[in-house]
Image (cartoon, grey):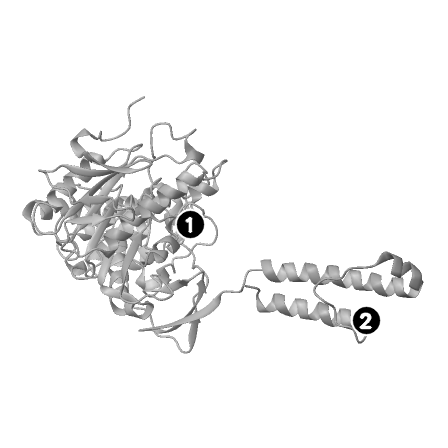
Amino acid sequence: MASPSARWQVFGVQQVCRAQLPGRVLPSSVTVNRKHVRAQGETVMKRNLAALGCVALLAASAAMAQTTPAKPASVKATIDTGVLVGETIDGVNHFRGVPFAKAPIGDLRWKAPVKPDKWIGERAAVAFEPPCPQPVNIDQKTSNGGGVSGVQSEDCLYLNIYAPANAKNAPVVVWLYGGASFLGAGHLGSYNGTGNAKGGVITIPINYRLGSLGTFAHPALTKEGGNTGGFALMDAVAALEWVKRNAASFGGDPNNVTIAGQSAGAAMVVNLLSIPSAKGLYQKAMIESGALLGAGTPLKTAEDNGVKAVTALGLPENATAAQLRSISAQTIVANAATQRGSTPPVDGKFKTTTTLDALNAGTEIDVPVLIGSNSGEGGFDGARTIAKLAGDTGAGAWLYHFAYVPAFRKAEWTKGAIHSAEMMFTFDSIDTSSWSASATGKADANDRAVAKHVNSCWVAFFKMDPKAKSLTCADGFAWPAYTDANDDAAQFFDKPKLVKSKTIPNGPPAN
């Protein structure tokens, strides 16, 4: 449909043509009789030439009216802090740059996130907010370019919402991006939730604090009470609390929420399976290429590591909390001692145990889990271990192995689907993915068909009853929950198939 501005352009051209040819209304097409023009002489010729010019203008303007994209319609949502004004694009409501916590700056750095303030009037939600501070080393071989370039800010605790325009009690997925815990942002193209929205699912990618701004422990902070290192995980819990309060404002079901992530984000999901304050905030968990099952870092060890890190920046061993907060974000990001941060410690308060210990004891947050890895990376054995422990009793677990290599990456990915390659298929976001944007070739019809199918399986998981023991993808592919007895895993090539997980190698061949 033509936009209003384009229609006014056509109208304007019509008025010019009427002015040139008084008393005449131009038809949609004009045929010029050349013999008649010659017979009438120069005056009539000029008049008809003017008509021809007007016809050309009208044709061009009409074409513009047909091809100029319509300006997205505004859409409003009222949440607990005020009114948001987003936009509707092709049946999907987009709300960007929505704060779920106050800016963690000044005295709020290295503290648990605080609920955002209310605002007066309407808040525009049509632009992404800056990512959290991180180093940038542009490398087109990595999925996020080695860091998100452009403006960065510690004021970064924002989320983005992709919701079906007609959503009602729709399932919600909260997405935690990957990036080794010190890179990334929720607005990157691979995480575009339009594909999920087309399937009836609301997607909410969030930002969380990175590097030492997200995971840092120090005795001076511990003395403040509760500020013991797991700030990125606290951000995820705060976002889940926000979703619990506000999902219904976007047509979402606050009691059907999946916490999902890839790589570092997946490791956060694993951690959240044993975080007491996260219980009841999500009903399913999805873990893509991030089966972190470490022993856990004691708080004292994390504190000692924090002291060593800041002394490398010139601070004394007994630095105060105020001195720590005086370090600039740029310094933290640029210095090797503080750039990457550490693992969130077991502090006995926020993080009381490791997920491995909780799984072995049967005390984890018992929700359905979908977990797997890719053929061109390692980690499948860890994914199978979590599937076995999480699905042994209670809620089910679904195990996958993603092995499809798209046409535009076959020359490079010779050992299989590399780390993070699955996301443009699970999200059905090939056209916005950085893997696609940086490729020399283009996706073919088969790539797009695979994306549609894989996305339908993920959407089926988001939608399914938490008590289910099987899910069904768009074309009828039945995917049973994994058990040690059936050993079933879904393997995704051109077409999905069930295989015995014990036949799948942990990673790609050595050469």
Residue kind at label 2, given as amino acid type: Leu
Of residue 330 and residue 99, the one placed in the foreground of this image is: 99
> Can the viewer see residue 240?
yes
**Disc 1 + disc 2, Cβ < 8 Å:** no
- SS assignment at label 2: loop
Residue 181 on image: x %, y %: 31, 46
Residue lying at the far left in this picture: please name it: 361
Q: Quadrant of the C terminus?
A: top left
Of residue 145 and residue 105, the one placed in the foreground of this image is: 145
Label 2 Cα neighbours within 10 Å, binned few <14 / some 14-19 / many ≥20: some
Query: Quick check: 173 above or below 116?
Result: above
Q: Quadrant of the N terminus?
A: bottom right
Q: Residue 488 is drawn in which quadrant?
A: top left
Query: Quick check: 316 above or below 321?
Result: above
Residue carrying label 1: 189
Question: Residue 327 vs residue 111: left or right?
Answer: right
Residue kind at label 1, given as amino acid type: Gly
Residue carrying label 2: 21
